[in-house]
Image (tube, grey):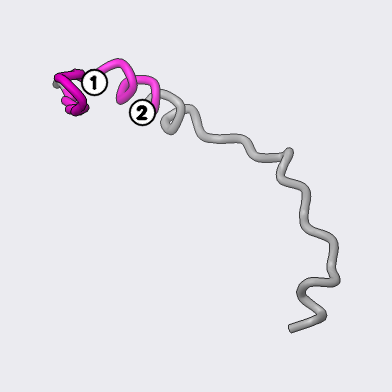
């Protein structure tokens, strides 16, 4: 167990998401709306 913590963590700067992942997240964020009513928040996904 100690050996695992003594190793240097791998660099995560090389992360390259797929184009489909980016498109999915952008489309999801465009369709999401948050409605504020008094002290409550309602999230609605508009498709």
In the figure, is residue 35 to the left or right of 27?
left
Magenta span of residues: 25-45
In the figure, is residue 17 to the left or right of 40?
right
Farthest-out residue, bottom: 1
Q: Quadrant of residue 43?
A: top left
Q: What residue sits 30% from the left and 25% below the top?
A: 28
The numbered mark, 2 or 1, whose residue comes first in the sequence reads 2
Q: Nearer the viewer, residue 35 or 26?
A: 35
Q: Residues within 10 Å of mark 1 (few under 14, many from 20)?
A: few
Q: How many numbered discs, if any?
A: 2
Residue 5 place in picture, x, y as percent? 78, 72
| Magenta residue check for 31 | yes
Instruction: Tell me if residue 26 comes above or below residue 17 in the rendering.
Output: above
Q: Secondary structure at mark 2?
A: helix
Q: Name the residue tied to disc 2.
A: 24
Q: Nearer the viewer, residue 19 or 46?
A: 46
Q: Quadrant of the C terminus?
A: top left
Residue 31 place in picture, x, y as percent? 24, 19
Q: What residue sits 15% from the left and 19% below the top?
A: 37
Query: What mark, if any, has residue 46 been given in the picture?
Result: none
Q: Name the residue tied to disc 1.
A: 34
Q: Quadrant of residue 27?
A: top left
| Magenta residue check for 47 | no
Residue 42 place in picture, x, y as percent? 17, 27
Q: Quadrant of the N terminus?
A: bottom right
């Amino acid at each position: 167990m100690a050996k695992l913590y003594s190793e240097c963590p791998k660099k995560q700067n090389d992360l390259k998401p797929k184009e489909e992942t980016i498109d999915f997240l952008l489309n999801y964020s465009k369709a999401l709306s948050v409605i504020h009513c008094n002290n409550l928040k309602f999230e609605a996904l508009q498709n």
